[in-house]
Image (spheres, rainbow, N blue to C red):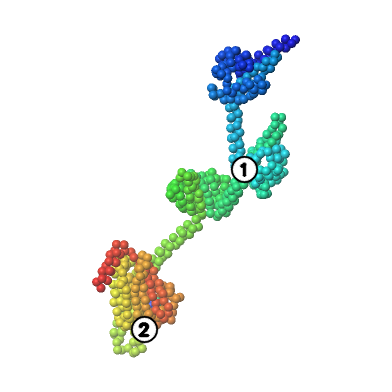
């Protein structure tokens, strides 16, 4: 029975020795190897029975310096790990005593290659380090908590986010970081049911009670029996993002309200005219639902003959000229043709490619119609003015003939009856004569007035100072009679109609003389340079004009009341205005009654820069010679 047991133990030992993936040897106190396993022979390549262990294992001739035999034979079991310089591998070594039944002690040495184990350890250690770094440096808060709500571990971001110190947190329950702890119960139930929850949006609470919007991603860790062990949570603070979102939404709402409340039509469209956005006003204008308009090209509303021009206009928009306006015709749902004005803006991506167009437009039909009506009325007015001028000219011309005949008859009558008439009849005939003269002068003035519009424009470069002198010569007798003095500044050369300019100066000077005050007339003619024109003035010391008449005196037949004793018909200034307007200038008066009047008029400078320079040079020559 005992022998059976021994045999069995020997078989088991042999199996262990063979199965063991390391070296096993037994040696005596004097280092002699007594036994070893098959692996020993395979690895060392020698059969070591009777050999010294230091020779068999390390090919040494004397005892290894690290030998622990002394301690083992004193009864110690010694275990250590070593990195072999021979093959650079890790070994685990166990040396232990074997107590023989005869009282002898041997040593068993077990050597195992643990390099792979060591490498796995190292990888695990590195992995652990990596996770630890990630955990600590994560910007998201990370927490591990028990099912009861006690925190097991949290990272620094968690403490920063919630405002707790690490020690404070250890006495805090997870439910305290929920703005509404009831939410936590619901969340926990859901989490346990699903095992993991991603991006759950919740309101968290800091230590100071302030709230923050967070995204929570959590998972459950189970023990080996499948019971919930703890929760792992990653928390992202999205308060700022939420605020930005809110601000964006608010500004978008505001923008939308502005666009939608516009009475202007607003739309966005692609290059092919397909509408991607229209506001309420647009949909109302076209009497179509927005849904009906979007995805449809606005070119459909434009008459076919106008489409190419509109397409060309849109094509012409570029990063250099991204905004342009267009006026176009459209046909409404009811078939009516209307006018619209649009301001188009091209929207570009970062590469300068057009993404879309944005346009703001309005209906222009009433304006276009009003402009058309105005234009046709203006043309009508011009025509009727021309007819009137023609009529005045012909009438004046034809009226003069019988008038001159009446004057001639009166003259003959007067000659024939000379000396035979009583003074009363003579007075009547004289009155009739002077009336015909007055009538003739009136008709002549009228003729002059209507002639201004009839003549072909005849502008030449003339010296306005010479023109003034001509006018003064024509008025010589009136000047002498009234002892008038006329002074003037050097006057420039201008491009004008010479005879009209003589008439203008003559009218103004004769008025200045005619409407003189108590003192002899003192008249000065001057000129100043204004932008692109010469501004002349004729100043007198006469009776002056009251402000209400400043404009009226320039109208035909308009005279100032209570001045009937001054001869005249109220045509002179109307003539002056017509002449100045004919030259493209303006005429006006400044005056205060009793202190004289100053008449101003402008004549645009039509000469080119070169001739202007020439004139200036000539003028300075004159000055030098003088
Ligand atoms: P007329 O001299 O024939 O009355 P005008 O058209 O030349 O017609 O002038 C219109 C009116 O303007 C004159 O009747 C006069 O009352 C007023 N007027 C014109 N020039 C002067 C002036 N230099 N001083 C005062 N009043 C003037």
Q: Residues within 10 Å of mark 1 (few under 14, many from 20)?
A: many
Q: Quadrant of residue 441?
A: bottom left
- Image marks 2 and 1: residues in contact by CB distance under 8 Å: no
- Asked whether residue 313 appears in the rendered view, the answer is no
Mark closest to the chain's N terminus, 2 or 1: 1
Front: mark 2 or 1? 1
Give the residue pinned by disc 1: 157
Q: Nearer the viewer, residue 569 or 83?
A: 83
**The residue positioned farthest toward the right in the image shown:** 1
Give the residue pinned by disc 2: 519
Q: Above or below — where is 326 with respect to 12?
A: below
Q: Secondary structure at mark 1?
A: helix
Q: Position of residue 528 (x, y in %)?
A: 35, 70
Is the residue marked 2 within 8 Å of ligand 1, measured from its CB?
Answer: no
Q: Nearer the viewer, residue 211 or 436?
A: 211
Q: Quadrant of residue 105?
A: top right
Q: Above or below — where is 11 with respect to 363?
A: above
Q: Residues within 10 Å of mark 2 (few under 14, many from 20)?
A: few
- Which quarter of the frame holds ligand 1? bottom left
x 25%, y 73%: residue: 626
């Amino acid at each position: 029975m005992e022998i059976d047991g021994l045999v069995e133990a020997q078989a088991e030992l042999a199996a262990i020795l063979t199965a063991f993936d390391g070296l096993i040897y037994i040696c005596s106190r004097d280092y002699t190897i007594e036994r070893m396993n098959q692996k020993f022979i395979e690895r060392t390549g020698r059969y070591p029975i009777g050999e010294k262990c230091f020779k068999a294992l390390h090919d040494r001739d004397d005892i290894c310096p690290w030998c622990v035999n002394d301690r083992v034979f004193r009864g110690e079991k010694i275990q250590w790990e070593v990195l072999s310089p021979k093959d650079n591998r890790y070994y685990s070594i166990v040396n232990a005593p074997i107590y023989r039944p005869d009282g002898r002690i041997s040593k068993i040495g077990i050597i195992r290659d643990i390099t792979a184990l060591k490498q796995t350890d190292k990888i695990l250690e590195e992995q652990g380090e990596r996770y630890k770094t990630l955990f600590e440096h994560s910007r998201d808060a990370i927490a591990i908590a028990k099912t009861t709500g006690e925190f097991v571990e949290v990272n620094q971001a968690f403490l920063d986010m919630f405002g707790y110190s690490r020690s404070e947190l250890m006495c805090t329950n997870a439910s305290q970081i929920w703005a509404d702890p009831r939410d936590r119960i619901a969340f926990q139930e859901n989490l346990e049911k699903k095992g993991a929850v991603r991006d759950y949006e919740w309101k968290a609470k800091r230590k100071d009670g302030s709230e923050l919007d967070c995204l929570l991603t959590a998972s459950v860790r189970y023990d080996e029996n499948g019971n919930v062990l703890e929760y792992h949570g990653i928390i992202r603070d999205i308060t700022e993002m939420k605020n930005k979102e809110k601000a964006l939404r608010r500004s978008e709402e505001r923008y939308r309200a502005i666009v939608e409340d516009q009475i202007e039509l607003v739309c966005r469209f692609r290059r092919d005219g397909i509408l991607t956005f229209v506001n309420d006003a647009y949909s109302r204008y076209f009497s179509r639902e927005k849904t009906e308009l979007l995805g449809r090209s606005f070119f459909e509303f434009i008459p076919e003959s106008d489409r190419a021009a509109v397409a060309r206009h849109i094509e012409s928009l570029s990063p250099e000229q991204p905004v342009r306006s267009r006026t176009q015709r459209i046909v409404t749902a009811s078939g009516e043709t209307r006018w619209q004005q649009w301001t188009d803006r091209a929207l570009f991506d970062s590469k300068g490619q057009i993404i879309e167009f944005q346009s703001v437009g309005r209906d222009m039909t009433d304006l276009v119609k009003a402009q058309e009506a105005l234009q046709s009325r203006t043309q009508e007015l011009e025509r009727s003015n021309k007819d009137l001028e023609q009529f005045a000219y012909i009438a004046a011309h034809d009226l003069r003939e019988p008038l001159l005949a009446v004057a001639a008859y009166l003259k003959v009558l007067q000659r024939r009856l000379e000396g035979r008439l009583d003074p009363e009849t003579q007075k009547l005939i004289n009155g009739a004569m002077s009336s015909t003269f007055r009538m003739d002068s009136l008709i002549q003035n009228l003729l002059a007035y209507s002639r201004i519009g009839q003549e072909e424009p005849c502008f030449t470069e003339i010296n306005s100072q010479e023109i003034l002198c001509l006018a003064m010569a024509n008025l010589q007798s009136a000047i002498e009679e009234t002892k008038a003095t006329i002074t003037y500044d050097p006057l420039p050369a201008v491009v004008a109609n010479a005879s009209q300019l003589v008439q203008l100066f003559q009218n103004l000077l004769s008025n200045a003389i005619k409407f003189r005050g108590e003192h002899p007339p003192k008249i000065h003619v001057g000129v100043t340079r204004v932008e692109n024109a010469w501004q002349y003035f004729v100043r007198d010391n006469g009776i002056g004009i009251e402000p209400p008449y400043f404009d009226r005196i320039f109208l035909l037949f308009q005279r100032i009341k209570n001045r009937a004793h001054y001869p005249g018909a109220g045509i002179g200034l109307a003539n002056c205005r017509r002449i100045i307007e004919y030259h493209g200038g303006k005429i006006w008066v400044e005056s205060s009654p009793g202190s004289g009047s100053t008449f101003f008029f402008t004549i645009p400078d039509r000469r080119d820069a070169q001739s202007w320079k020439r004139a200036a040079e000539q003028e300075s020559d004159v000055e030098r010679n003088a």
